Image (cartoon, coloured by chain):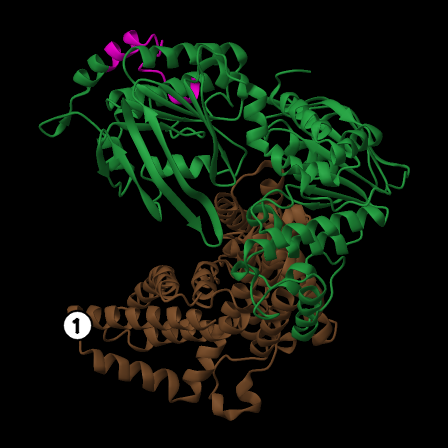
Chain colours: A green, B brown
Amino acid sequence: MTKIELRNITKSFGNFTANNDISFCIAENSVHCIVGENGAGKSTLMNILFGMIKPDEGEIIISGSPVTFASPHDAIAKKIGMVHQHFMLIDDFTVLENVILGDEPVKGISLNIASARDKLKELISKYDLEINLDEKISNLSISIQQKVEILKLLYRDSDLLIFDEPTAVLSPIEVNSFFEMVRNFKNTGKTVIVITHKLNEVKEIADKVSVLRKGNLVFETDNVSGGIDISEISSAIIGGAELLTIKSKDNQAKSGQIIVRLENISMTSNKRKCLNGLSLSLFAGEIHGIAGVEGNGQAELADIVCGIEKDFEGTAEMPAERASIVPDDRLKKGLIMEFTIGENFALKRKGNSYHSEKELLNSSEKVINSYEVHAPGPEVKLGSLSGGNQQKVVVAREISSGNEVIVFSHPTRGVDINAELFIHSQIVNERNNGKAILLISSDIEELLSLSDRLSVIYKGKLVRTYETEELSNALNNSEENSDGKIHLVNQLGKLMTGVSH
Amino acid sequence: MKSNFLSVFLSLAFTFIILTILIVVIGKDPLEVYSLIYTDVFTSGYGIGQTLFKATPLIFIACGLAVCFHASLFNIGAEGQLNAGSFVIALTALQLDSLPLVLAIAISAVAGFTAAGIVGLIPAIIKVKKGVSEVITTIMMNFVILALINYLMVDFFAVKSTLRTVSIGDKNMLGKASDIFPFFEGSSLNITFVASLVTAFLVYVLIYKSTFGYKLRAVGFNEVASKYIGIKVSKVVIASFFIGAGIASFAGLNFIFGYKGYYELGFSNNIGFTAIAVALLAKNNPIGIIFSSILFAALDYGGLAVNQLIPKEVMLVVQGLIILSILSSDSIVRNFYTKKGLV
């Protein structure tokens, strides 16, 4: 029986379509996994289901009748609960206080803690949660905190539980007990939605899988007693079929000298081991692609190569001058949105000099003309440009500072196709100018069409590096016979998700 | 820019209305009070002179604060910084009475700037190294510095049974503006007012036109992006604290060389805090600071003028109202513009 149906859900943010006409059903008393790359639209879809975002079009149907959610309160009233990737707990409160917060049982004008405590104790023993209600959140491990979040939902009698990347923060043993818990929920008649990009987990717990890519629902399959085909899903996620379209690279890689050498790099941040014995070499005149599921150490690798992060173990040989970086998040890391283009460029200056209005406008205009930036005028602030044009400005600024090493971290994420092509041609240009380029991306197409060498990062380590020849062999085959490329993509998918090594 | 003017206007209008109500509640005629303020402050050369004289230290200090505020560093320590600087200015000036006046002032100013700057460096370094919020450390530094100066004064430098240093002597003092322009009728206005205007202009160029200024504001807008762009954020934090605190010390030039001839404990009378409001009202724009300083100085002097009618503390209420209303009118105006799609 259908628990919830999503019909023709569409949601756009400006020019960017996060969800495009998505329809699917979630069966009652099942575990439904939603998979896809970052930016594929999973979180937007779930936020719509949880009432945090209003869809532009489409409707949600619960047990046969359409509903509209003005806020998560409405969703909670319909017994939908969500555990976010980042927990929403108050560190200085106890478990009990956190759970009842926002839904406090009252007797007259005072809190009726005793009744809440009884109910919670019952739930804890029913689902084997093993939580001490009087412990402060700050004293609990991440996995217990997650259980507190779950307890919150159970306390509010949710029977549809949504988990956003629940296992990202858990160790393998904790993952197993999490699965146990999910099965338990299913056995007691609840419906569970899990957002994830770990395919071996999908295989283990899902009854049904939906794959999103670039805002579209591209693939759905039932998982009958774990007999699901993972490679089928992984190529649906990364879009193997589209691979044959882009071929922007001219393959004349100049073999230069080593510019960056990292040897056995390990790094721990927030008590999490994010890099674990990573070794990498980067030559002048090459594009070294890094493929991987996000959160496997790419961000930390980028920070180390461009000299922002210095707190790590292992040896790193790099040029004295800081590398340029096109960071993964242009809003937070790339640009000063309150400044004009010229002013953003001025930030790269060494020393201190006077900047006249005219000089800054000229500098803006030069960038607008030579990098095809679409801006209403040279005096506008970056905040009012579209994402693709903002990204072009970041790329232009980093390229023009003329450093030997350039890190591109997800350079075309969330930009339109024209900006994407333009940025790709700039990356190849810089490679041909002899720059050493590290290209981090979760877009396999991008990596295959640009990389001279390609490494796969998994759990803070490069698990496989494809040399130039190996890559071009696999890709050349595909011109007569696409098997070589599809085989390569399947292999990459498995390496990225840790299915094989 | 337009929205800035609008929110300043809204804030002043709101303050004016509340002040009027306040005067009525006290049982006085607002018209009488306002006309008294007007005639005392604006119709006599002495009133204008006194107002500009009182604006001088505010301009210096608020310009210094603007440097910090543009980097999103909420420096509440101007009171301590300017006292440290002024104290050192007085002590230095005492050693230099044989030098020509211009030279003596220049050397004292450098010494005062450095002393105040070093006081400003302490919270900056603690912030950079340990991530402690500058709000807390700068507030605490005020107590530390004032207590330290108190100790040094009482035990070493103060004239017996007073809280002031020895005077530098009349021949080492700056002349009054009214010596040349009789219009000012013997008010305390002196050339340091012109120096404060020059300082405001220089700080304007530093913040809005120099590479350092762009980096400073970039850090204020988005520290993470600044780091990725390659700006050395900690250097910017340290430099802006040093410069900002240093400039605040120039308030002492006005008092020591232009007015009393000595450093006196408590001379600043919490002007380091008033300057925060001055800078906020001017949106941290040094040119705007000139005007908001003059407004606050007029209120201060006007408060004295109407003391017979209403308690002069009412003017403190006015200053507080301006801060509260400028902070809230900012968001009101921003929402208004966003709704109209103008931003």
Give coordinates of residue B313: x percent, y percent.
Answer: 30, 65
In the figure, A309 relative to B321: above or below? Answer: above
Residue at the extreme bottom:
B182
| Towards the viewer: A309 or A94 | A309
Q: Is residue A244 visible to us here? A: yes
Give coordinates of residue B280: x percent, y percent.
Answer: 45, 63
Look at the image and tell me in which quarter the N terminus of chain A lies.
top left
- Residue linked to disc 1: B24
Magenta-colored span:
A120-140
Is residue A134 located in the magenta-colored stretch of the structure? Answer: yes
| Towards the viewer: A15 or A101 | A15
Residue A373 image-quadrant placement: bottom right
| Towards the viewer: B71 or A166 | A166
Task: Identify the residue at horizontal 58%, vertical 73% (top origin).
Answer: B196
Mark 1: amino acid: Val
In the figure, A431 relative to B213: above or below? Answer: above
Look at the image and tell me in which quarter the C terminus of chain A lies.
top right
